[in-house]
Amino acid sequence: MHASPLSCRIWVAAVYLMLTSLKGVASTKLARDLGISQKSAWHLGHRIRAAFAHDRDRLMLGPIEVDETYVGGKAKNQHASQRNGKRGVGGKYPVVGILDRSTGEVRAEAVDDTKKDELQGYLEENIRSDTTVYSDEMRSYDDLPQPHEAVQHSTGEYVRGEGHTNRIESFWSMLKRGYVGVYHRFSQQHLDRYVKEYAKRRSLRELDTIDQMTELITQFWGVRLSWVDLVADRATTW
């Protein structure tokens, strides 16, 4: 909020709208609801998303589900100039997510690729060494140091006892409904903030609204996203 020309009332209203809009809220609607310009609403939204992404110090206890997905428009629908340099499947960008079954917390992040070093490095940063991991049969999860069980989606197996990734896949469904129905596009430059917004909102859903707002506002401390930084070209650094 440092040096913000917007009133505290607008900030509080924006926090409320972003927490209670389960599929997200577009900057155009945020601007109408708050009576500010679309440019101000877009900047405000991303400053709040930066706070959504701020709380990442604790290791998850588990057991956890891990999965990866791809977000973005299809390359065949894009102009040739827009397809240049596109990574991922069909012009989409890779995202990894983990869900803690013991707490319901979700963490997700845009990643450079879905190779072994990338995905296992993300797990190492977020979970304890004795945490049980459930995944699909993707080779990137082979030889995990944690207790690990994989279901074989390629053979039609989706649940085997406690082994499944249904809850993290449900989170992907919500993220993609928001992409299609609200935003229509996540740029690579800002993808990570949108993904972490959805993850944090999913993690807080069991709390009362006022407690959700309190939890998010406490994460404002030490977070700042200036306009210059927001519009800078950081497409390769997430």
Image: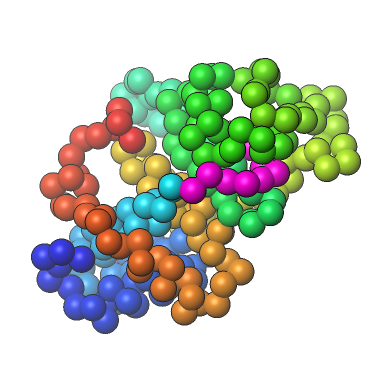
Q: Start and end of the magenta stretch?
A: 58-66
| Magenta run includes residue 65 | yes
The residue nearer to you, when weighing 67 against 33, is 67
Residue at 19 percent of width and 78 percent of height: 7
Name the quadrant of the N terminus: bottom left
When the figure is inspected, residue 119 is found, relative to residue 106, above or below; the finding is: above
Residue at image point 38% right, 48% down: 193
In front: 78, or 66? 66
Q: What colour-coding does the image apply?
A: rainbow
Quadrant in the picture for residue 213: bottom left
Residue drawn where x is 30% and y is 31% of the image:
237
- Characterize the magenta stretch by its predominant secondary structure: loop
Is 6 positioned to the left or the right of 103 in the image?
Answer: left
Residue 132 visible to the viewer? yes
Return the x and y of residue 42 as percentages of the image width and height: 27, 59
Is 93 left, or right, of 159 in this rendering? left
- Considering every residue shown, the one lying at the far front of the view is 130
Q: Is 213 covered by the magenta stretch?
A: no
